[in-house]
Amino acid sequence: MLATAAAVGAPSVLLAPLGREFGWDAATVSSALAIRLAVFGLASPVSGLLVDAWGVRRTACCGLALTATGLAASLAMTQAWHLVLCWGVLAGAGSGLVSLALGTAVAARWFVTRRGLVIGLFGAAATAGQMLTLPALAAVAEAQGWRGCILASCGLLALATAAMSCLVPEGPGDVGSLPYGARGIHPASSPPTAGNDRGTVAGIARSGLFWALLGSFAVCGASTSGLVQTHLVPLCADVGVGPLQAASLLAGMGALTFVGSAASGWLSDRFDAGLLLFWFYGLRGLSLLCLPFSDLSFVGLSVFAAVYGLDWIATVPPTASLVVARFGRERAARVLGWVFAGHQLGAAAAAYGAGLTRSGMGSYLPAFLAAGAFCLFAAAAILPLSSARRPSVQEPAAAALAAGERSGRHRRSTTRV
């Protein structure tokens, strides 16, 4: 996931080199990146289906290979539609297959306890891949040109593909092991819940919790990738904060996502996921609503960036935990794929809508106020639907373990008699 995030983030440092060589303006290159974002979201549900049909290893290798193919083919591009096809469609589809849906499937198969922490680390990898490698890729692009940067990204993807195909087993049973925390008992699947209907799309769509998670994750994408990540730097320019300082704010947010995501995963293993989502969305909404009423100085924006960075990926572990607990381990990747598609579509809508707000009203602040209100609405909507308790994947395993212990005591008692 980190390698894929790094590879698909590489084009963001190639806007100027491509413009110099082909005469394309920023809007032309950005259109390919926007299409990549949309295709990424639409490929996430496909990732869940392929995990069920092919398994984790084949799905991951297919996604990595498709991403590398798109980037490698762009070395020979000469027209703008080549860019859209290679970076937008091929790389977008490949990176969508290696998304959070895949990571959730791995966490559900390999972990009974500490699952939230693992999902949090996967979410951080998807964000941190760009932050960790972009400076190095930018240096390669400066020294070797944009083609050297693309080749470096393809090499990273090839290394990740080799590691997945050679080193990663499909499940704990392939190596004679049990999921982490199973304590000698294979955890049973979550029992079917209302509106599940054996995991069919129609059955899942009849679940109120599914739509609440889909809607709230769309708000998550709109308030993070679509609004803050895309428009924070232009907002800073509007209030007199320089581009270098604005970039440092985003870099600080990226670093804090590690802490926030890991902490959220730790909390998801110990507290109710719906209650955590209520607080995470609520705090995010309050920070967005308070921002327009601050002095919008660099210090004030730094405080906002610190709070927002800790909350950026914090919604991922409890959302994934709710999906696994309420829809079952076997259907988790499929359901989360659709939920993550909502995240990306919400991000695309917010990116476009905030631009319209800036052009029509001359300010980004109404967009930030609207995003804050949507976050508060998401917090209020998710709490009542998630509070109806359903057995989680840990509970059947614990019940089976307790039943085994009672059976063992009964046999020992009968032997003594």
Image (cartoon, helix red, strand yellow):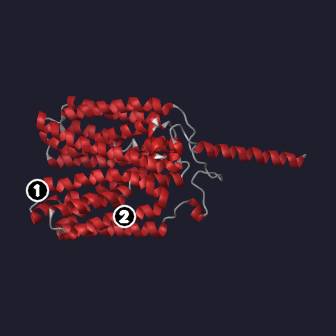
Is there a contact, CB below 8 Å, between mark 1 and mark 2? no
**Residue type, mark 2 in image:** Leu
Q: Which image quadrant for residue 289? A: top left
Q: Position of residue 85 (x, y in %)?
A: 24, 61
Q: Position of residue 349 (x, y in %)?
A: 25, 42
Q: Residue at coordinates 21% horizontally, 28% vertically from top-left?
A: 293
SS class, disc 2: helix
Mark nearer the N terminus (1 vs 2): 1
Q: Residue at coordinates 28% horizontally, 50% vertically from top-left?
A: 38
Q: Is residue 110 above or below residue 142?
A: above
Q: Is residue 180 above or below residue 276?
A: below
- Write down the residue under mark 1: 25
Q: Position of residue 158 (x, y in %)?
A: 36, 69
Question: Could you tell whether 52 is left or right of 142 in the image?
Answer: right
SS class, disc 1: loop
Q: Which image quadrant for residue 132? A: bottom left
- Write down the residue under mark 2: 64
Q: Residue at coordinates 48% horizontally, 68% vertically from top-left?
A: 167
Q: Nearer the viewer, residue 389 or 131?
A: 389
Distance of label 1 from label 2 (alpha carbons)? 29 Å
Q: Is residue 112 above or below residue 144?
A: above
Q: Is residue 362 visible?
A: no
Q: Is residue 349 visible?
A: yes
**Residue type, mark 1 in image:** Asp
Q: Is residue 23 above or below residue 349?
A: below
